Image (tube, rainbow, N blue to C red):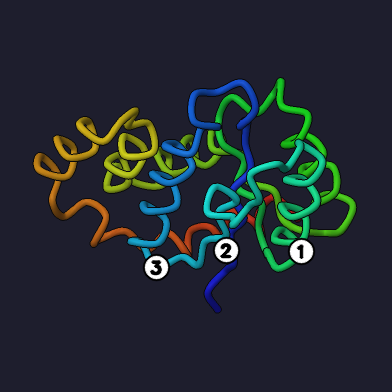
């Protein structure tokens, strides 16, 4: 089974609503075989307010098996609403920091994906991909995420 992973994190107050970070993480997970629901890809209206974005984001989140929470979420009202709702509805919650720690403990093979998640801009991404062309192709993150979600639930 391919997990549907919803990305959650701080957007308000971040340059370009943190779309760069969301899109880089979505790309890394997709290239590793995961099905990603990325709120940064939402088709929104120009005059939407925060509550309008949240209503649509929560609708998107309802299709997810796992909420993947990006680092820096702590001061985000929206991300914390998503986390609380996911927990109450039985949607698995995986924090990027826990995920990275588990990956490092699991295998040094996964260190490339951790670096990839922390790339800050397109130039760094291109440099990373040039220096590490095979890292993402060898990672089976979907299976790893399934086992991590299972271990967190038990």
Left or right of 53, for residue 88 = right
Q: Quadrant of residue 60?
A: bottom right
Sequence-wise first label, 3 or 2: 3
Q: Which-is-in-front pick, marks 3 and 1?
A: 1
Residue at image x 43%, y 46%?
Answer: 23
Which mark, by number, is residue 62? 1
Residue at image x 57%, y 68%?
Answer: 3
Residue at image x 78%, y 29%?
Answer: 77
Q: Which-is-in-front pick, marks 1 and 2?
A: 1
Q: Is residue 114 above or below residue 38?
A: above
Q: Nearer the viewer, residue 87 or 27?
A: 27
> In x, y percent, where is residue 27?
37, 53
Q: Quadrant of residue 83?
A: top right
Local secondary structure at mark 1: loop
> Real-space Cα distance between discs 3 and 2?
12 Å
Q: Nearer the viewer, residue 118 or 142?
A: 118
* Residue at the extreme front of the image, as rendered: 47
């Amino acid at each position: 089974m391919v997990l549907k992973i919803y990305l959650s994190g701080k957007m308000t107050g971040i340059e370009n609503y943190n779309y760069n970070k969301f899109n880089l993480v979505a790309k890394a997970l997709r290239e590793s075989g995961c099905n990603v629901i990325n709120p940064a890809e939402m088709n929104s209206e120009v005059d939407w307010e925060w509550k309008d974005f949240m209503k649509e984001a929560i609708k998107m989140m309802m299709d997810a098996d796992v909420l993947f929470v990006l680092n820096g979420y702590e001061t985000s009202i929206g991300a914390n609403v998503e986390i609380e709702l996911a927990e109450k509805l039985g949607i698995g919650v995986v924090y990027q920091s826990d995920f990275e720690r588990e990956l490092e403990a699991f295998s040094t093979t996964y260190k490339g994906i951790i670096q990839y998640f922390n790339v800050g801009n397109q130039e760094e991404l291109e440099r990373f991909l040039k220096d590490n062309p095979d890292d993402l192709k060898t990672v089976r993150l979907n299976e790893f995420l399934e086992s991590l979600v299972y271990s967190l639930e038990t």
